[in-house]
C-alpha cells in the first residue's frame, strides 16, 4: 500500500459518465482519494454520502475528492444519481489504480479467501505527495477526519 511520502500514481480511470481521465489532472492542488469495495452496498453508500455531505467544505479549501472502485461507469452513474452524490466517482475496472495504490488485497469472509478492494483513503498535497494514509477505513466519522487533515495542508 502507498505510504506517506509516496507520489500520486498517474493512473487512467473512467468517470461515472464513461469519460477517460488521469489522476494527474489534479496535480497542483491537494487531493483526497478513497477506495471502496462496491457501489450501492451499505458501507460504501454511507461513505459516499458522508463525503458528499462535506463536499462544499472540501471545495472551499480546494481539495477535490475522488472515490474509486472496480464498478463499471454505468453502475457508478446509477449509484451517484440514486443518492445525489457530489464526489467524483471513478471506475477502475482493469484494477490498475487498485494495484498502484496497493488496495487490491486478499480478504477473508467466513473462512473463504478472495481478492477485493481494501477500504482506504489517501490525502495528497499540491505536489502530489501522500501526506496521510488511512488503511482499513471504518466509515463512521471518516470523511470528517479526512476533511480535518486536509484543512492542515
Image: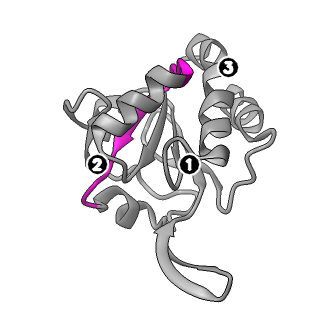
The crowding category of the residue bearing disc 1, from other C-alpha atoms within 10 Å (few below 14, some 14 to 19, many at least 20), is many
Q: Residue furthest bottom?
A: 111
Q: Which residue is mark 3?
A: 53
Q: Is residue 115 above or below residue 143?
A: below
Residue sitting at x 59%, y 49%: 121
Residue sitting at x 77%, y 37%: 145
Which dot marks residue 122? 1
Would residue 91 be seen by someone viewing this image from the given angle? Answer: yes
Give the foreground label among 1 and 3: 3
Q: Is residue 90 magenta?
A: yes
Residue sitting at x 80%, y 42%: 140
Residues 105 and 133: in front is: 105
Location of residue 104 in the rendering, given as x and y in whole percent from the top left corner: 45, 69
Residues 77 and 65: in front is: 77
Nearest to N terminus: mark 3 or mark 2: 2
Location of residue 75 in the rendering, given as x and y in whole percent from the top left corner: 36, 38
Nearest to N terminus: mark 2 or mark 1: 2
Q: Is residue 122 magenta?
A: no
State the separation of the CA atoms marked 1 and 3.
Answer: 19 Å
Residue bounds of the magenta highlight: 83-94
State the separation of the CA atoms marked 3 and 2.
Answer: 27 Å
User: In the visual, does 146 lie left or right of 45?
Assistant: right
Q: Is residue 146 above or below residue 52?
A: below
Query: For numbered disc 3, what is the local secondary structure?
Result: helix
Query: For numbered disc 1, what is the local secondary structure?
Result: strand
Which dot marks residue 10? 2
User: In the visual, does 53 lie left or right of 113?
Assistant: right
Would residue 153 be seen by someone viewing this image from the given angle? Answer: no
Q: Quadrant location of the C terminus?
A: top right
Amino acid at each position: 500500500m502507498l505510504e506517506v511520502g509516496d507520489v500520486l500514481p498517474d493512473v487512467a480511470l473512467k468517470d461515472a459518465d464513461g469519460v477517460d481521465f488521469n489522476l494527474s489532472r489534479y496535480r497542483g492542488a491537494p487531493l483526497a482519494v478513497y477506495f471502496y469495495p462496491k457501489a450501492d452496498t451499505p458501507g460504501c453508500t454511507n461513505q459516499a454520502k458522508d463525503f458528499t455531505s462535506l463536499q462544499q467544505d472540501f471545495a472551499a479549501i480546494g481539495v477535490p475528492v475522488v472515490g474509486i472502485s472496480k464498478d463499471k461507469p454505468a453502475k457508478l452513474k446509477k449509484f451517484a444519481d440514486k443518492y445525489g452524490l457530489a464526489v467524483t466517482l471513478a471506475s477502475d475496472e482493469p484494477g490498475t489504480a487498485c494495484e498502484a495504490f496497493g488496495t487490491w488485497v486478499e480478504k477473508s469472509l467466513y473462512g473463504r479467501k478472495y481478492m477485493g478492494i481494501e477500504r482506504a483513503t489517501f490525502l495528497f498535497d499540491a505536489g502530489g505527495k501522500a501526506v496521510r494514509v488511512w488503511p482499513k477505513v471504518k466509515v463512521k466519522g471518516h470523511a470528517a477526519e479526512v476533511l480535518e487533515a486536509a484543512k492542515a495542508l
